[in-house]
Amino acid sequence: MESMTEQEHLQAAELTDEAVDAASGPDAAQLEQLQQERDQLLDRLARLQAEFDNARKRQEREKAEFRDYATGMVVEQFLPVLDNFSLALSANASAEQMRTGVELIVKQMDEVLRNLQVQAIPAVGEVFDPRLHEALGSVERLDMPDQTVAEEIRRGYRIRERLLRPALVRVVSNPAQNEA
């Protein structure tokens, strides 16, 4: 027998290692099955990601459609008020008639807000509440208790329990109560 060259010896060792790996590792059928399972899982993952993206886009579109629908419902209720303001501006009426017309429009506007469950925040005579009132200043008065709202400058509103805007008020500073 002739002796093997070093290169032949290395090739034989590699072949032996491959034979050992093949004998101890998964056979070709198992390897093929694992690759198919991996490919199926990757395909399923890609499909789930696409479904998720489509669901997110659909949800955003439905939210925008609902917001537009709700806005339309609110605007529709204010259109008669706007019509009445336009009529009042085009009328040739006395100052007293204009005042009466504007008062009716304000009542109509209050009714629309009430239908939308928007409520005015009580202010004058109430105890100052920084969650509902924004103090614009103070007024010295002896006839009202300290820290009571004396004057409402701009009405505040809330819808159910959510504050839309605070009432702008002037708060009583009663020197007689402050000294005690």
Image (cartoon, helix red, strand yellow):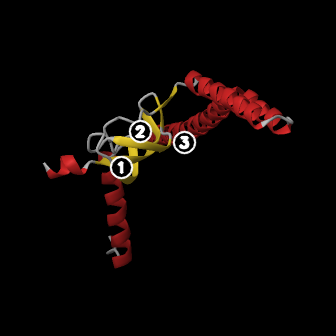
> The N terminus lies in which quarter of the figure?
bottom left
Q: Give the number of the disc on residue 46.
A: 3
Q: Position of residue 31 (x, y in %)?
A: 43, 43
* Category of crowding for the residue at label 2, using alpha-carbon neighbours closer than 10 angstroms: few (below 14), some (14–19), many (at least 20): few
Q: Give the number of the disc on residue 22.
A: 1
What element does badge 1 sit on? helix
Q: Nearer the viewer, residue 148 or 122?
A: 148
Q: Are marks 2 and 3 in contact (CB under 8 Å)?
A: no
- Total residue callouts: 3
What element does badge 3 sit on? helix
Among numbered discs 2 and 1, the one appearing first in the sequence: 1
93 w.r.t. 16: above or below: above
Disc nearest the viewer among 2 and 3: 3
* Residue for point 30% across, 53% down: 20
Q: Position of residue 113 (x, y in %)?
A: 58, 28
Q: Which residue is mark 2?
A: 30
* Residue for point 26% across, 44% down: 146
